[in-house]
């Protein structure tokens, strides 16, 4: 009987304990005062584990115990026959065991047809509900139309570098960046993070072969399950070609039309419309992210783009040459996104540019990225940064390198050349 199965699942989940890396994504005040949340992001980024953290936090903040929660993973094979009309059995099964109002943690509920009607009804009846959304079936842009304004969207990303260190039991504090012995160990962790990214299972795995195989598995799931199945893509190899072109152009302006022209030049039979659609699909499933050109006019801002991968690990799959500059720039972008900062790139009419313009509360933070600051790179980096500083009326800018450090004073302006390890561990830089 389905209700008995649900009772067993509820009780099993209440008694289950599992280790996880504490991430503190939702602020305490929001977690207490807001009732309904939907957690979205790349597959394997840790959404299910974050539900465990939410459960423990609510036990602490709201003085709840384990019996106050219903946790259901709708990918459980015991629920393979569960239908829309059966969803009410979840509440019935719980009420027959515990005479109180539960907090619901619904993992991958979108596997059930018309699940959103149940989710909306729970919200309308003042239940506290947390839903995780698979990137193939619940996209960011669809949440408002699917759930109305009832649910607060929370983006879950792969580990930040600090979370990667915690996962690898690497102890650090504000003094770590000043100890030469610790810096050496820190750089080993950075190399690992640059190469293989921050997906939790990959971060914690020490074997490089296993890391690469996991990345291949994730990528295949993106291409052949999330994308090809959802949008009925007949030629997934064309999708892979677009991904390769985006990888080649990390840090450079590009757009779907220019990608189409490059594919056409090598006789890839794809249309402009299909290219635009495929790029959009890649954004929707969190494989890539777009960075807009800074313009005071929003319309002009939307006309220019750069693309980055939302995790460095995927760059490893298309590695022909060791372009550490692209890897480093991609990594800096992902860390900015994980810090939830609003970011653009800047370029003037002369073609001089600044890689990242981070909009803070009362100022702009201007940042260039280069693997090595040398005679070849310094003219481009300095010139673009100085002109951006003039434009944004800033007296200070930053150049992130792999391991160089220096302070340059030019034209009454201060430029800090900062090693990556310092920037990653010091949010104030």
Image: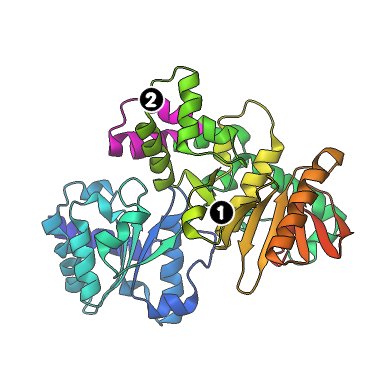
- Dominant SS in magenta: helix
Image quadrant where residue 67 sits = bottom left
Residue 333 place in picture, x, y as percent: 61, 51
Q: Is residue 226 above or below residue 66?
A: above
The circle on residue 361 is: none
**For the image shown, how many numbered marks are present on the structure?**
2
Of tags 2 and 1, the one toward the viewer is 2
**Residue at image x 42%, y 63%?**
154
The crowding category of the residue bearing disc 1, from other C-alpha atoms within 10 Å (few below 14, some 14 to 19, many at least 20), is many
Q: Secondary structure at mark 1?
A: loop
Q: Judge by depth and name the residue closer to the eye, 414 or 228.
A: 414
- The quadrant of the picture occupied by the N terminus is bottom left
| Residue 365 horizontal/vertical position (percent) | 68, 63
Q: Is residue 92 above or below residue 297?
A: below
- On the image, numbered disc 2 is attached to which residue? 270
Q: Residue 389 versus residue 191: which sits nearer the camera? A: 389
Task: Give the labeled residue for mark 1.
Answer: 159
Part of the protein shown in magenta: 219-243
């Amino acid at each position: 009987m389905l209700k008995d199965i649900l009772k067993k699942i509820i009780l099993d989940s209440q008694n289950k304990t599992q280790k996880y890396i504490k991430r503190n994504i939702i602020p305490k005040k929001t977690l207490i005062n807001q009732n309904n949340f939907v957690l979205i992001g790349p597959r394997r980024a840790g959404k299910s584990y974050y539900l465990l953290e939410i459960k423990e936090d609510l036990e602490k903040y709201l003085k709840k115990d384990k019996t106050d929660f219903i946790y259901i993973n709708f990918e459980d094979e015991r629920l393979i026959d569960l239908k829309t009309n059966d969803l009410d059995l979840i509440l019935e099964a719980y009420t027959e065991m515990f005479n109180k109002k539960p907090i619901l943690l619904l993992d991958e509920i979108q596997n059930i047809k018309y699940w959103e009607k149940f989710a909306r009804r729970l919200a309308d009846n003042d239940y506290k509900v947390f839903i995780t959304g698979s990137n193939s079936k619940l996209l960011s842009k669809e949440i408002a139309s699917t759930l109305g304004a009832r649910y607060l969207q929370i983006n879950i990303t792969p580990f930040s570098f600090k979370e990667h260190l915690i996962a690898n039991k690497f102890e650090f504090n504000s003094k770590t960046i000043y100890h030469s012995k610790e810096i050496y160990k820190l750089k080993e962790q950075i190399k690992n993070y640059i190469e293989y990214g921050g997906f939790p299972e990959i971060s914690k795995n020490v074997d490089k072969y296993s890391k690469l195989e996991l990345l291949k598995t994730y990528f295949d799931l993106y291409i052949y399950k999330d994308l090809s199945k959802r949008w009925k893509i007949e030629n997934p190899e064309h999708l892979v070609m677009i991904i390769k072109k985006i990888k080649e152009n990390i840090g450079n302006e590009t757009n779907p039309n220019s990608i189409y022209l490059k594919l056409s030049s090598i006789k890839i039979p794809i249309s402009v419309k299909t290219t635009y659609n495929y790029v959009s699909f890649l954004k929707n499933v969190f494989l890539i992210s777009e960075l807009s050109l800074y313009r005071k006019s929003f319309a002009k801002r939307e006309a220019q783009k750069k693309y980055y991968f939302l995790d460095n690990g995927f760059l490893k799959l298309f590695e022909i040459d060791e372009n550490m500059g692209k890897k480093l720039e991609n990594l800096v972008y992902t860390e900015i996104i994980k810090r939830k900062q609003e970011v653009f790139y800047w370029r003037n009419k002369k073609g001089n540019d600044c890689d990242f313009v981070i909009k803070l509360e009362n100022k702009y933070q201007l940042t260039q990225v280069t693997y090595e600051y040398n005679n070849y790179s310094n003219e481009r980096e300095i010139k673009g940064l100085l002109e951006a500083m003039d434009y944004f009326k800033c007296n200070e800018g930053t150049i992130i390198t792999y391991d160089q450090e220096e302070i340059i004073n030019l034209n009454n302006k201060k430029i800090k050349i900062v090693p990556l390890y310092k920037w990653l561990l010091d949010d104030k830089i």
